């Protein structure tokens, strides 16, 4: 709910009518149709230079893998180009309707995972760039990702526009529904994926229904036991993480110059435990540390520091795999201001808890002092907790449209939890003006993404950057 500061620091809440009026007033400053207008501003920066600026804080030997993964296709490039798009969004129209932004809300950053009561749900699941900001920034990145993915799938312009419009309409209708809900009902709201799957199976073509069933079964099987079977072997009677350089490098195989030992990992894991609630801290105390390894993750994240940590509970058949992923300053900070949290790991965790209806019970953060004298922030979560994602590469237009509506709904729920759903709903209205503007923006920005991708291809070709493929 929207609020304002009252006397003595107390929160004086706006009523529903005031919130709606504020949302409608935004139309005068930022017309809804204006969101469809975008073109490269004069003097727009070199997109490759934006990526190169991020290299300075990455592990040098892994940077070529990042470029190799981004160079696979325009969609792969888009996934790693959140910093480029942040700068572009900052030059566009901006409402004053603030939410907690995901910061990188492309379609592959939504997915399946298990809730604490072990049901499968669907939600946004990547918050590395989370920061408070205008609601439309997330939405524009989401619809642009569908336009880029639609081109990669060979969909025609009419099909892509239909999909983008459906995403915007789903968000607009969902935020209106959430605006009418009681506060606690909204806070608890989440997707019951089993129920959704049953409905989809009844309506979808058999091939699509079978594919969804396989995706759900795969997600359910993806847990610490699966990771244990795939990522470990026995060395002198004790399980150890396998070596698969450069993607997985066990701690004992790292150069001595890395300056990281098992004792230091155990110490920082103790720091991590202190960020958990009391009951979960007691839970973690039942596990003993066994091994750790550096692991390459993602597309745009490649080169940032990421570790997997193996722990054991009651015996060798009771594993827990955690992932500690480096959290740097959000790519949105140059345009929206610094985070309120001094530790960027905490920034990610707090943003995720705010936006998700159900989050990993072991989410926490830590800060590590490196051998180079620098400090590094990390957030920690379970490595595999029945996580799954859809395969964009096999989506037919109708399936992508259904998926787009689901993503739009999930993003609206996240924004309604963290922002003023009444104000946003009033701003968007009941018509399709905003939906159409988003679809126009998506196509225009997909054009720009292709130009930026071509710039990366040229940089690889002329040796400006090195790209390692196949890893």
Image (tube, rainbow, N blue to C red):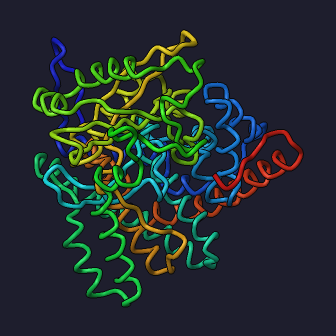
Residue 366 x %, y %: 35, 23
Looking at the picture, tell me which residue is in the foreground, 347 or 375: 375
Q: Is residue 92 visible?
A: no
Tell me which residue sits at (50%, 80%) in the image. 396
Q: On the rendered structure, is 151 left or right of 455?
A: left
Looking at the picture, tell me which residue is in the foreground, 267 or 373: 267
Against 377, is 90 above or below? below
Tell me which residue sits at (24%, 55%) in the image. 114
Tell me which residue sits at (68%, 58%) in the image. 72
Q: On the rendered structure, is 209 left or right of 160?
A: left
Q: How many callouts does the rendering have?
A: 0
Q: On the rendered structure, is 155 left or right of 424?
A: right
Against 404, is 188 above or below? above
**Quarter-of-image position of residue 241:** top left
Q: Is residue 187 visible?
A: yes
Against 200, is 391 above or below? above
**Quarter-of-image position of residue 371:** top right
Residue 66 x %, y %: 64, 44
Extreme front residue here? 236
Looking at the picture, tell me which residue is in the foreground, 131 or 197: 197
Residue 16 x %, y %: 18, 45
Looking at the picture, tell me which residue is in the foreground, 133 or 423: 133
Residue 131 x %, y %: 41, 34
Extreme top residue here? 373
Extreme bottom residue here? 206
The quadrant of the rendering that contains the N terminus is top left
């Amino acid at each position: 709910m929207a609020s304002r500061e009252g006397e003595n620091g107390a929160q004086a809440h706006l009523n529903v009518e005031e919130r709606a009026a504020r949302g409608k007033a935004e139309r005068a400053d930022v017309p809804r149709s204006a969101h469809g207008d975008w073109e490269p501003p004069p003097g727009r920066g070199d997109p490759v230079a934006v990526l190169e600026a991020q290299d300075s804080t990455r592990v040098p030997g892994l940077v070529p893998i990042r470029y190799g993964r981004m160079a696979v296709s325009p969609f792969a490039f888009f996934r790693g180009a959140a910093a480029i798009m942040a700068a572009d969004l900052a030059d566009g129209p901006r409402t004053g309707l603030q939410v907690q932004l995901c910061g990188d809300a492309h379609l592959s950053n939504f997915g399946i995972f298990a809730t604490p009561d072990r049901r499968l749900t669907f939600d946004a699941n990547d918050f590395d760039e989370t920061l408070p900001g205008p609601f439309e920034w997330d939405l524009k990145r989401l619809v642009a990702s569908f336009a880029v993915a639609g081109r990669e799938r060979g969909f025609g312009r009419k099909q892509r526009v239909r999909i983008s419009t459906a995403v915007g309409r789903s968000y607009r209708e969902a935020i209106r529904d959430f605006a009418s809900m009681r506060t606690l009902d909204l806070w608890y709201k989440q997707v019951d994926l089993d129920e959704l799957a049953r409905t989809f199976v009844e309506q979808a073509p058999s091939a699509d229904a079978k594919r969804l069933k396989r995706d759900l079964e795969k997600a359910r099987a993806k847990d610490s036991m699966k990771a244990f079977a795939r990522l470990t072997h026995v060395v002198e009677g004790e399980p150890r993480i396998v070596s698969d350089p450069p993607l997985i490098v066990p701690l004992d195989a790292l150069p001595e110059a890395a300056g990281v030992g098992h004792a230091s990992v155990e110490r920082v894991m103790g720091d991590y435990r202190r960020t958990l609630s009391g009951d979960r801290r007691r839970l973690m105390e039942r596990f003993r540390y066994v091994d750790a390894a550096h692991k390459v993750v993602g597309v745009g994240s490649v080169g940032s520091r990421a570790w997997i940590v193996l722990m054991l509970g009651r015996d060798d058949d009771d594993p827990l795999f955690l992932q500690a992923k480096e959290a740097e300053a959000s790519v949105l900070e140059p345009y929206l201001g610094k985070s309120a949290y001094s530790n960027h790991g905490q920034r990610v965790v707090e943003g995720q808890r705010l936006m998700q209806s159900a989050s990993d019970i072991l989410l926490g953060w830590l800060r590590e002092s490196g051998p180079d004298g620098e400090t590094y922030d990390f957030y920690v979560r379970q490595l595999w907790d029945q996580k799954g994602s859809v395969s964009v590469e096999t989506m037919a237009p109708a399936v992508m449209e259904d998926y787009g509506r689901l993503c739009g709904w999930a993003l609206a729920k996240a924004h309604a939890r963290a922002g003023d759903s009444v104000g946003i709903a009033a701003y968007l209205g009941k018509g399709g003006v905003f939906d159409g503007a988003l679809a126009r923006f998506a196509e225009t920005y997909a054009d720009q993404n292709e130009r930026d991708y071509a710039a990366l291809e040229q940089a690889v070709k002329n040796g400006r950057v090195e790209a390692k493929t196949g890893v």
